[in-house]
Amino acid sequence: MSLIVCPLHELSAATDRHRPSHVLTLLAPNAEIPVLPTIAQDQRMSLLFHDIAEPMPGFIPPDKAMIARLLLFGAAWDRRAPMIVHCWAGVSRSPATAYILACQRSESGREQALAHALRQVAPHVTPNALMVAIADAQLGRGGRMVSAIAGIGRGAECALGQTFELPLV
């Protein structure tokens, strides 16, 4: 099964098209959480933080507790249907999350291959480095996730990302 990553403005269409069992929302703290009546509350999670790669005054960064919740949510997904992961633009937070969940579901040592797979299906993404670093530590990957994401570099410039699918093997 796969992870579907999309920007907020494509969420409704992606939900209709892919019929996910789980939806993970990553938005700014003051954002309105989209209503998705077809997704059960226990199969839905929202994490609210700013899309920043290092702490900044006045902004809420992703933190260890948020990434731990993300990993628990990912572990509970049975993969019988896709999971949709979305953020505002579909460029940084949601691609980082898809990469984190793919690493969680894969054996250690596949971090670089997964980063390259992400780049192949989504040339526009620049995964949030702070999220990846926190997950790397929590998954015990010894910096391999951070190194792999740094290795694919910044994605192509864009205002908004496009929906893409990251297959899990």
Image (tube, rainbow, N blue to C red):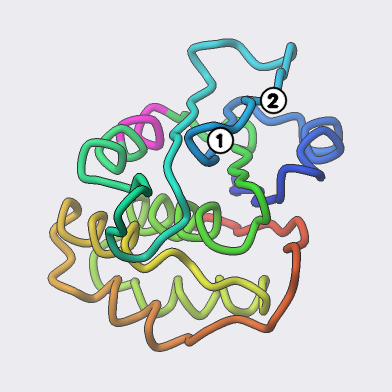
Check disc 1: other Cα within 10 Å, few if <14, some if 14-19, many if 20+.
many
Q: Is residue 164 left or right of residue 137?
A: right
Q: Residue at x 47, y 55 (%)?
A: 51
The amino acid type of the residue labelled 1 equals: Thr
Compared with 54, 100 (above or below) is above
Where residue 66 appears, as percent x and y from the top left, is 30, 38
Characterize the magenta stretch by its predominant secondary structure.
helix
Q: How many marks?
A: 2
- 56 is higher (above) or lower (below) than 19: below
Q: CA distance from mark 2 to mark 1?
A: 9 Å
Q: Secondary structure at mark 1?
A: strand
Dots 2, 1 in contact, CB < 8 A: yes
Q: Quadrant of the N terminus?
A: top right
The segment highlighted magenta reads 72-76
Q: Which residue is located at x 68 percent, y 30 percent? A: 20
In the depicted view, which residue is nearer to us: 108 or 65?
Answer: 65
| Front residue of 143 and 31 | 31
Q: Residue at x 48, y 67 (%)?
A: 127
| Residue with the mark numbered 2 | 34
Q: Is residue 75 magenta?
A: yes
Residue named by callout 1: 25
The answer to whether 108 is drawn above or below residue 72 in the figure is below
Question: x, y percentage for residue 117?
Answer: 55, 74
Question: In the rendering, which numbered label is found on residue 124?
Answer: none
In this rendering, is residue 114 above or below 17? below
Q: Amino acid at mark 2?
A: Pro
Query: Going 68% across and 55% down the picture, which residue do you hit?
Result: 89
- Provide residue 91's location: percent of width, then percent of height: 61, 63
